[in-house]
Image: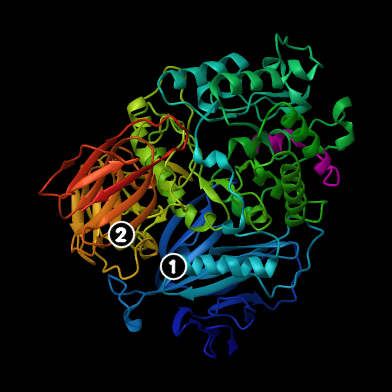
Amino acid sequence: MTVGAGISVSDDGKLMVLGNCILHDVPDNIVVTPASGGALANGAFIGVVSDQIGSRRVFPVGKLEGLRFMCVFRFKMWWMTQRMGNCGQDIPFETQFFIVEARDGSPFGMVNENDSALYAVFLPILEGDFRAVLQGNERNELEICLESGDPAVDEFEGSHLVFVAAGSDPFDVITNAVKSIERHLQTFSHRERKKMPDMLNWFGWCTWDAFYTNVTSESLKEGLESLEKGGIPPKFVIIDDGWQSVGMDANGTEFKADNAANFANRLTHIKENHKFQKDGKEGHRVEDPALGLRHIVTEIKEKHALKYAYVWHAITGYWGGVRPGVTEMEHYESKLAYPISSPGVQSNEPDQALNSIIKNGLGLVNPEKVFNFYDELHSYLASAGIDGVKVDVQNILETLGAGHGGRVKLARKYHQALEASIARNFCNNDIISCMSHNTDGLYSAKRTAVIRASDDFWPSDPASHTIHIASVAYNTVFLGEFMQPDWDMFHSLHPMAEYHGAARAIGGCAIYVSDKPGQHDFTLLRKLVLPDGSILRAKLPGRPTRDCLFTDPVRDGKSLLKIWNLNEFTGVMGIFNCQGAGWCRVGKKNMIHDLKPDTITGYIRARDVGYLPKVADDGWNGDSVIYSHLGGEVIYLPNNATMPVTLKAREYEVFTVIPVKILSNGSKFAPIGLIKMFNSGGAIKELRYQSGRSANIDMKVRGCGLFGAYSSTQPKRITVDSEEMDFEYEDGSGLVTLSLRVPEEELYLWSVTIEL
């Protein structure tokens, strides 16, 4: 018997996790090594004993049959999505995260240990120069696929390939497992240890969908002015692809599409193109820095009170890399390389960008010179007033490892150089990681704190919108341990705009749009953005509720998706009907499989919000108040009570969930927040209860508009900044409302006192 911490392989070939069989028919060469040190008792590494050598090897670990699982896998080179199943053959290639329900629990997670659920998480990791990933086969075997990405790198140790952990709370298990891997690898940092860039707390605008690569200085100004005129001022801007100096090789094959870049282009200079130079002319370069990018960045920051300006660049400079032989770029020693993607990636969805780069090759900067490249690029951008970067196309590095010691070594070299340059040139850890859903990068990121969490927002693809919401939520179960997930831009004026906006309000992410000038829904934006340009951002990455982890909200025709998050004193939960479209494993693309999905009824309860007790007072009895954003209803839910929710196809609802406080005079109270905002409770920044003959509630509240709270008794008086205020009280529901005016100061906190 090979024994780990609560995890063992029995003499009859079963992988046992805390007394439960997860895999059977485990081969003799599979070994389990206990995790050493740290807080996680129930964790161990799965490895393999083998005398095989080779840059790619596949090892069966055992058969999985009859247990529900959820995994996230790369459905194409750049991005992950979710899949649910109950046997080994359901596990797709390129699975990077896998959680299995080892034992079903009682419906309300009671404290009786025999009734509690048990979850086991499997995380394939990096070992030396190799990357492990999971997959299944037709014999229902879970397999480890081990790759170096370089034919010359063919010897591996094999003892620490997959980390396995188990426990009764899935979110705790996952967090502790990633922290254990952090201690083991010492090559990355958990999200909780990273500095979050302040741009996350403000509303922004991105140029991409508005202008694609045709963006200019003038169109940049038009976009910002258009939003500001409507009373929703962006406080950050992302100047996406289209600002750089790029060109094709004479013999290159152009890629043409209205909504994409020409992937055959390569970077020809680190400075901006003529469109971002003052009075710039094509083919002519202005050398005076004051007439370059700096002139437009200075203008938009001064005119629009922008806090942060980001620009886009690829991790290799541009899609086609850095052009070799260009005089100003020779010292980066770029050489033409031709990507080779792994068989696992090739077996999933084809990708136009990758195919174009494979055909034209990529000018890869010498890894020994890549810090110089980033540093010179970023120092120039910083001198022009740019505050940060969105770094795209990151997974391309895994295809270029041959001759560089393999994919892991190359990725780590690039990521270390990138993070060092960001730290040196930008003061606020201002970087968004994009097209970066591989573990080569995730397990090499010590500082980067924001990651795009799914494939793009595709405005014209009707299949994509429900898929987008579900993919981000499930990807975040894994990605949210490393970085704060970014839900991508969306359009405020779009048939699915409210659906997307509601999801982002719960996501804990930056909120930014890519509206064309003049094409905005300001009514929607006011549910997300305050007049000072700030947002009410939830504290955590938004994730599916525990009871949604193993159901399929896009394919099974019967399940709703519930996503939860926390504020300082409240929870927030979004409910979405995502049925009707999903990634098709046969067609290998997003497809609508049901043109008219059914209306679905599901159930919610307060404790669907994970960690809700953490924002409740000691002695909380489990009673909660729920406020429905669209319904405008206040519902009192006793401990463990459930409430039905019915949604038609592509409908949503957002609920603010508040633990009830029983006051000294017997009154019950629960602050809701700004009830016209999606994330109402995000407005409450301080909360204190005072007991006496009458009970007082003191709050600090950010923002303006209609503030609401539940009270079982009518308040005697309410003051705001010591000024007595008029308020309304509904006897039937207990809803108290009052109006907060627009404050003169940015991020101002009103002092609200309610006397009961």
Task: Locate residue 219 relative to residue 248 in the image: left or right.
Answer: left
Are circles 2 and 1 on residues that touch, CB within 8 Å? no
Q: Quadrant of residue 548?
A: bottom left
Task: Locate residue 623 relative to residue 123 in the image: left or right.
Answer: left
Residue designated by label 2: 690
x, y (%) of residue 553?
Answer: 34, 52
Identify the residue shown where x is 86% and y is 26%. 328
Q: Which amino acid type is shown beneath numbered disc 1?
A: Pro
Q: Quadrant of residue 100?
A: bottom left
Q: Nearer the viewer, residue 510 or 114?
A: 510
Q: Residues within 10 Å of mark 2 (few under 14, many from 20)?
A: few
Q: Nearer the viewer, residue 579 or 427?
A: 427
x, y (%) of residue 329?
Answer: 85, 30
Identify the residue shown where x is 82% and y is 59%. 152
x, y (%) of residue 587?
Answer: 46, 45
Q: Which amino acid type is shown beneath numbered disc 2?
A: Gln
Q: Nearer the viewer, residue 616 or 752?
A: 752
